Every structure is written in structure tokens, then in C-alpha cells.
Image (tube, rainbow, N blue to C red):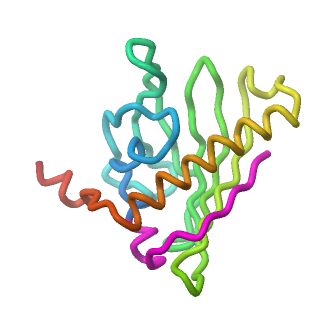
Amino acid sequence: MSTVTRIVRASPERVWEVLADGWTYPLFVVGATRMRDVDEEWPEVDSAIHHSVGLWPLVINDSTVVTHVEPGTVLGLRARAWPLGEADVEFRLAPHADGTEVTIEEDVASGPGVLVPPPLKGLSLTWRNIETLRRFAFVAENGRAPLASEHRGS
């Protein structure tokens, strides 16, 4: 299990806007290389983003599904990258004097990763999520990432 928190200097509404736009995920999720499709219902429960992970030419096409959502505050995901496995990921947002406190909690749910000793698994997930939140802050604070509504128009 890994829990990482960062203050993002953007409003909770802007932070949620980035999370709610599935097309932005390769901009900040470590390991995601490209987005192939985003369900129109994203980020409703059971909707999915269809992505690729890995380094070209060794990429795996898979998907991430919304497991629970509290619009504006919580987004729970089941991230898949078979044959590597699956992980449960939760983004939590809370207003903060300097913007938004963003927390990522992640744990391996299935696959070979469950066999990794917890201290080693926790370290690797923590490193990955520290970098993910660093990239996420760049997008939310500075980036002009296109919004989902702009993608659907193309």
C-alpha cells in the first residue's frame, strides 16, 4: 500500500477537471504511454479509459475502470496492465489554503505484484506516485490540457 499527498496550487474545480478528463492521463500517470479511447460516460462508475503502458515497442494495451466516484472529491479506479496485474487507485481531493490537497492511495489488487514483499512494493508504488503527483501538478497548475469536451468534437 502506498499513500502520497501533494498540495496542487489550483482550485479543487480545476484539479477535478483534469481528473475527469480521461484523455489527460498519459500526461501525468507514470508508465502510461498513450490513450486509445475514453468512454463517453467517464468518470462514471464502470466507465473506462483505454490506454497503453510500457516503453515502445513493448507496450501493453489495457484499460482502467472507475470503481467509485464522488464528483469533485474522490475517484476510485481499478487500473489494469496484464500480464503485470491490477491495482486499486484512489484520488482524494480536499480544499487547501494554497489550492487543493491531492492524495493518491494505491495497492496491488491482483497479478504477480501481490507476491512482492510489502516494503519493496510500498517503496516502488510510493516513488511512482510521487512522480505522478508532480506531473499532475504541472498539468493542473500550468498546463492547458484539452478538456474532454474538446476531444469529443474532433
Q: Nearer the viewer, residue 114 or 8?
A: 8
Count of numbered badges drawn on the protein: 0
**In the rendered image, the vertical position of residue 25 relative to residue 104, given as above or below:** above
Give the quarter of the figure containing the N terminus.
Answer: top right
Q: Quadrant of residue 112?
A: top right
Residue furthest to the bottom in view is 97
| Horizontal side, residue 84 vs residue 47: left or right | right
| Residue occupying image coordinates x 67% and y 62% | 5
**The quadrant where residue 103 appears:** bottom right
Residue 96 placement (x, y as % from top left): 59, 82
Picture coordinates of residue 81 (x, y %)? 56, 27
Question: Measuring 44% from the left and 44% from the top, which residue is drawn there?
Answer: 48
Query: Is residue 73 located in the magenta-colored stretch of the structure?
Result: no
Q: Is residue 31 left or right of residue 25?
A: right
Tell me: 115 left or right of 61. right
Q: Nearer the viewer, residue 107 or 128?
A: 128
- Residue at x-position 40% and y-position 64%: 140
Residue found at the far left of this picture: 154
- What's the magenta region? 1-17
Residue 8 horizontal/vertical position (percent): 52, 69
In depth, the one of 70 and 24 nearer the eye is: 24
- Determine which quarter of the picture holds residue 75: bottom right
Q: Residue 28: x and y, percent?
A: 45, 47
Q: Is residue 33 left or right of residue 150?
A: right
Seen in the picture, residue 84 relative to 67 is either above or below; the reply is above
Q: Residue furthest top?
A: 57
Q: Is residue 61 above or below residue 6?
A: above
Query: Is residue 4 inside the magenta stretch?
Result: yes
Q: Residue at x 88, y 28 (%)?
A: 117
